[in-house]
Amino acid sequence: MTLIGGLDQVGRVVKQPPFWAAFAGILVLSGGEKGRRAAVRASACYGATAAVANLALKPAIHRRRPRGAGPGPFGPLTSSMPSGHAASDTAFAVAAWREMPSLCWPMVLLTTASHWSLVRARSHYLSDVLVGDALGVAIAVWSLRLWPTPASSQDEPEDDDSVRAGSV
């Protein structure tokens, strides 16, 4: 099997929502407290991103898909821009990685395979995937502002006399 064939096979599986639900389940069952937090944040970001991409942006942008997109004579019924799969996958990956930094490389590899598959299967233009990525990152980062991770809340200096005395 070639590298391209392997990416295609992995990407076809990884771009599907049940894969990410199973991944969240594995995090809950085997990741301890960090895994549970990662699964909850990642799943919430996945759902929020899917809603924004598919219910708000796709109808507003309404871009045609590449020629030959999708199975059957009619292909997918939704707009091409942004890629909802890419947006949701990226939101899940970034959110999970922020809770569990050890997930960085697995998340990069999985989302790369998914996004490769979306473009290679002619479901999306590369720009659709990149805009989806930007949306996914934005929503995952936004979630950190609304709901800081324990690590990010510890990075901020405490508001007490010792901090003020040290800054004088």
Image (cartoon, grey):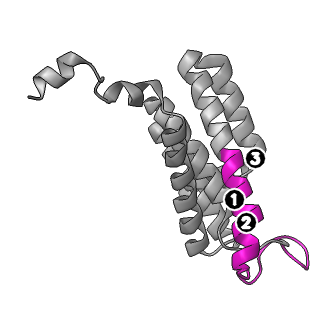
Q: Nearer the viewer, mark 3 or mark 2?
A: 2
* Magenta span includes 3: no
Which residue does the image show at 51% across and 44% down from the upper left? Answer: 94
Query: Along the polypeptide, which appears first: circle 3 or circle 2?
Result: 3
The amino acid type, in three-letter code, at marker 1 is Val
* Magenta span includes 59: yes
Q: Position of residue 84 (x, y in %)?
A: 69, 61
Against 42, is 5 above or below? Answer: below
Residue 56, label in figure: 2
In whole angstroms, how far apart are the C-alphas of marks 1 and 3?
16 Å
Q: Are marks 1 and 3 in contact (CB under 8 Å)?
A: no
The amino acid type, in three-letter code, at marker 3 is Pro
Say what secondary structure mark 1 lies in. helix
Say what secondary structure mark 2 lies in. helix
The amino acid type, in three-letter code, at marker 2 is Ala
Q: Is residue 5 visible?
A: no
Q: Position of residue 112 (x, y in %)?
A: 54, 54
Q: Residue furthest right?
A: 73
Per the image, the residue denoted by label 3 is 17
Q: Which residues are magenta?
A: 46-75
In whole angstroms, how far apart are the C-alphas of marks 3 and 2?
19 Å
Query: Along the polypeptide, which appears first: circle 1 or circle 3?
Result: 3
Which residue does the image show at 12% across and 29% down from the upper left? Answer: 167
Per the image, the residue denoted by label 1 is 52
In whole angstroms, how far apart are the C-alphas of marks 2 and 1?
5 Å
Residue 54 vs residue 42: left or right?
right
Against 162, is 2 above or below? Answer: below
